[in-house]
Image: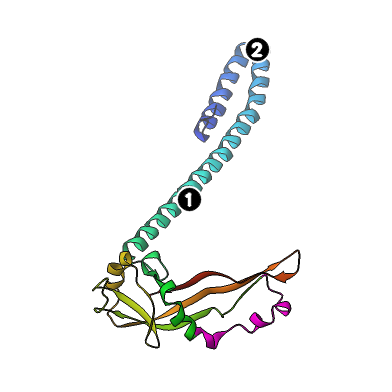
Amino acid sequence: MENIKIKHLILYLIGGFFVTAIISGMSENLGAILLLLYLISIPVLIFIYVKNKLSGNDKNKDKKTNLNNLKNILNDLNKNQKVNKNTEQPTYKSDYNYFELVGIYYYTENLEDFLKDHENPYWKKLDKSNLNRVYKYHRLKDQIIKIEREPTNKYDKNAVRASIQGKTIGYIAHDDKKRFLKQARLPYFVKADISGGPCKDLDPFTNKYGPTENYGYHIRFYI
């Protein structure tokens, strides 16, 4: 019944009419019964035909929708593949471009000699700062530092040091040196982020700042 087509309806109407007419000529009672059944079956078949037609349209729409969705997915995949093919080098702020100086602890005096002009005013007025943690020095962003070779280094003739105002503040880590030198020609100037150093935390029970702690300085940059 699901495959009823318009031609089937036409054949049924014509054939049923002739069969009913022939049988009515042979027997009026039997012909009357067949005519009644014939007339009842016509709207039933038309209803089934219309229902199948509408259902078929819905299925076609679903197929078209699924095909469109599949095409969109494939297009997105192709776009991503094109992006990946074009991105042969890592983008800015990727792990490949990120560096953090090491050995800063040994040059704290040099760093703080520079940071003394960037002291946090709240450091001496801790009761008025309303901060959970107060650092002695402001965090500096985009601070220019110089990176250059240090052939006179007695521990590493290939050392690459970082300095501010001519004073050493740290080094490019040994494991990062090769990666750094692939991207930069020395001497090289970068904008670095300097943070950390002496700090005091607010005690929520006493509402006073505790003793000075120093978790070290951090100097990071991207190239």
Give the total of numbered labels.
2
Residue 5 place in picture, x, y as percent: 51, 33
Residue 23 place in picture, x, y as percent: 59, 14
Residue 155 place in picture, x, y as percent: 27, 71
Residue under label 1: 69
Picture quadrant where residue 44 is located: top right
Q: Nearer the viewer, residue 221 or 195?
A: 195
- Distance from Cα at disc 2 to Cα at disc 1: 58 Å
- The magenta-colored residue range is 115-132
Q: Is residue 22 above or below residue 194?
A: above
Is 109 on the left or on the right of 212, as rendered? left
Give SS at disc 1.
Answer: helix
In this rendering, does residue 88 appear at all? Answer: no
Residue at 56% in and 42% down: 58
Residue 30 place in picture, x, y as percent: 65, 12
Give SS at disc 2.
Answer: helix
Residue at 47% in and 76% down: 193
Label 1 crowd bin: few (<14), some (14–19), many (20+), radius 10 Å: few
Q: Is residue 91 above or below residue 117?
A: above
Residue at 52% in and 35% down: 6
Is 133 on the left or on the right of 177, as rendered? right
| Residue at the extreme right of the image, as rendered | 206
127 part of magenta stretch: yes
Q: Main secondary structure of the magenta part?
A: helix
